[in-house]
Each structure stands twice: as structure tokens, then as C-alpha cells.
Image: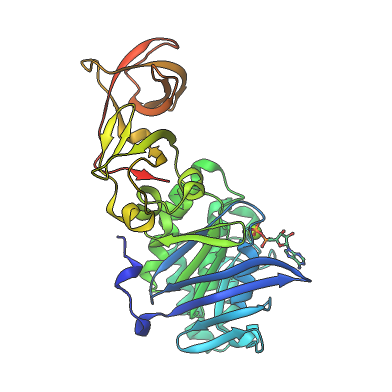
Amino acid sequence: MLKSTSASTATDHYLSVDNVSIQFDQAEILANISFDLQRGDIGVLLGPSGCGKTTLLRSIAGFESISAGAIRLGGNTLSTAKKMQPAEQRHIGMVFQDYALFPHLNVLDNISFGLFRLPKGQAKKRAEELVSQIGLSGKEQVMPHELSGGEQQRVALARALAPEPQLLLLDEPFSNLDVDLRESLSREVREIIKQSNTTALMVTHDQHEAFAIADLIGVIHARKLEQWGSAYSIYHQPNNAFVADFVGQGVFLDGDILADGKVATTLGSFERDPENVRQHQVSPGDKVKVLLRPDDIIHDDNSSLTARVTTRYFRGAEFLYTLQLANGEELLALVPSHHDHAINELIGIRLEIDHVVVF
Ligand code: ADP
Ligand code: MG
């Protein structure tokens, strides 16, 4: 289920990262980062390694100071450039890349570790509930080293959720796991977080994880939050060429803006996406780059429009073909894998596009 930030108002911002900048020594690592989460939302910040994701999470957790702006949670100001609420007063849970379980404690004791304020019986009951929520019933007494990586990470999640934190932060929680596991575990983790009605913010460099878990996604690049929105808008209505390129696959065709506002390409002319029209003002005659995703291009043996296969990647259910048009421009096409075409073969294509995005 995707929600749009545009519907939210000032009153329902639960976590608010408001114009936050972070410096180390004199160097600015992050500049003017702003986004909000409503209660129960799962947000994901996506960006290349070294872009400042961990630094931003640490500032929300209270381990890093900010040089400008404000971080607020549930109506309280956590951090400004002048004042910082101590981490231990923030009631924020964290899950890290390395599972960080206590190796000498079993599953149940790891999960109940943070529940020292509760009477023993209640702590045990709560921990048992969580063991069942993460699908590890029967493994209460098992030690961490006897669990798979995915199971360990679910225990780390349960341990972070046990004290019912006001906010859960997850820092690349799946990056030590097999690629095959990451997407399915992301979905499970989403379900567990949603069941507990916890507000969460995860950072990752992996877009598949982001799509699997997020209500809202932000893309960080070169110190800035380039875009914040639903997975759909990040993929189909990217704000700029970096977001378009970083999230999903695609190519850019040359385009010319026509008198009626449509954009002409070698494959015909197209209406622009309304959001793109709002964000990027162009005039007739302007030269633009037109984003085409692999799923915009349909292979059709009966089409008179053809393109030459230059590379092909077998992906099981489908081939990803790189196709060259007569004028030399390239396209990507996702084609069901029983359409097995050789390099250099000319194949028929047609376009299935409602609106295009141009830069
Ligand atoms: P990411 O998590 O996106 O990979 P980080 O937040 O870990 O990125 O790091 C962002 C940048 O800040 C990097 O260039 C890193 O070298 C730098 N950095 C991180 N921590 C510190 C620190 N304590 N002092 C100085 N520079 C740091
Ligand atoms: Mg990091």
C-alpha cells in the first residue's frame, strides 16, 4: 500500500527531519535534508555507499550532532544545532547490519534483554509473543550461532521491537545475507513491523529491499535528498536523471519538445507525465532526454518497428535485451524468456507508454 506525502499535513508528522545538515570537522556530509513520516509508516533512505545514510540514522538515534535544522519525534524536539536529547532518552530501537546478538544468550533471553523494567513474568510473556511473531516458535532456547543469518536478523528485530520503541531504525539490516534471501526477508520484516504498528526508518543501498519494505522512499545523492515519495513515484516520476538512473533500469532517448508540449523521439511522440510537467518547465524546440524503462518496450513479432539485439541476459522468467534502433540509439526490453533471440537478430517491438518523463 502506497501513501503519498502530499496528503499529509503539519499535524500528522510523527518523525520530522527538518532541513538537517551534518558536518564532520568542516566538511558537510549532508545538506538540508527534509522528510516526514506519519505514525506507522516505514520509510527507506536509498543511496550509494558513503552518501551519509548511517550518519543520518545515528543523528536520529542521538549518537551524532547536527549542524543545522531540527529532528522531531512525536511532538518532541530531539536535536537541533544547539541542543541534543541524550540517546538513552529517545526510546529509539536499532537494528544493524551485523546482527549484534549476545552470543552467550539464547533467543528468548536476547529478545527480553531490553525488558528489564518489566516484571520477569511479563517480560517472558512479551518475548514469547515476539518469538512467535518472527516465526521462531520452538527455538526459544537456541543459541545465536545455531541460527541462520536470516533467523538471527529476525531475532535482532524482535529484540529492538520488544521495548515498544517510539521509532525503529534499521541500518542495512540485510546486507550480510544472501541476495536471494534479502527480498523475501524484507517482506517478512515489513509484516512484523506493520503488525507491531511501529514507525520505522531503514537505510540501504539496495533498491529491491527498499521496494519490498517501504511505504515511502528517499534517494540520497551528493549530500542531498534528491526525492522523497512513494516507490511508484520514485520509479515512474523521478525528479532528475540521477534518481532515474539509480533506481531501476532504463535508457535515455533524445527528444524534442513540440509546439503542443508533447515530446518527439525516434519512436514517435508522447505526452509528458503531469508530475514531470510540473517539475520541469520546457519550451517548444528544447532538446531533452526521454526516460524509457525496460517494461515500456514490448516485444511483438507482428510489429513493423524493429530493433537489433546487441546483448541479452537470461533471467529465468525473462530475457533483458539491449536493442539498437536504426539511428543507433539503444533500448532495454524485458521479454518473456521463451522468446529466445540471437545477438544481431532484428526483432519487432512496440511501445506501451502512457506518459514519459523528460530531463
Ligand atoms: P553510508 O552509510 O551511506 O555508507 P556514512 O554515513 O557511513 O555513509 O558516511 C558518510 C561519509 O561520512 C563518509 O564519507 C564517511 O567517510 C564520513 N564519516 C562517517 N563517520 C565519520 C566520522 N566520525 N568522522 C569523519 N567522517 C566520517
Ligand atoms: Mg552505512
Q: Is residue 151 left or right of residue 325?
A: right
Q: Position of residue 68 (x, y in %)?
A: 62, 79
What is the x, y in percent for residue 188? 42, 56
The total of numbered circles placed on residues is: 0
Question: Residue 31: horizontal and vertical position, in percent?
Answer: 61, 68
> What residue do we see at 43% from left, 36% from top?
250
Which residue is nearer to you in this view: 297 or 126? 297
Here the colouring is rainbow
Residue 139 in view: no
- State left or right for residue 179 relative to residue 231: right
Instruction: Pick whichever, 194 or 286, lies toward us.
Output: 286
Quarter of the figure with the N terminus: bottom left
Q: Is residue 140 above or below residue 289?
A: below
Residue located at (65% from left, 55% from top) = 145
Q: Which of the 4 image quadrants contains residue 2?
A: bottom left
Residue 203 showing in the rendered view: yes
Give the image location of residue 301, x and y in percent: 24, 15
Residue pushed farthest left?
A: 302
| Residue 252 drawn above or below residue 94 | above
Q: Which quadrant of the figure has residue 343?
A: top left
Q: Quadrant of ligand 2?
A: bottom right
Q: Is residue 277 left or right of residue 91?
A: left
Q: In this view of the protein, which residue sits in the foreground, 292 or 190?
A: 292
Q: At 33% across and 75% down in the image, what residue appears?
A: 8
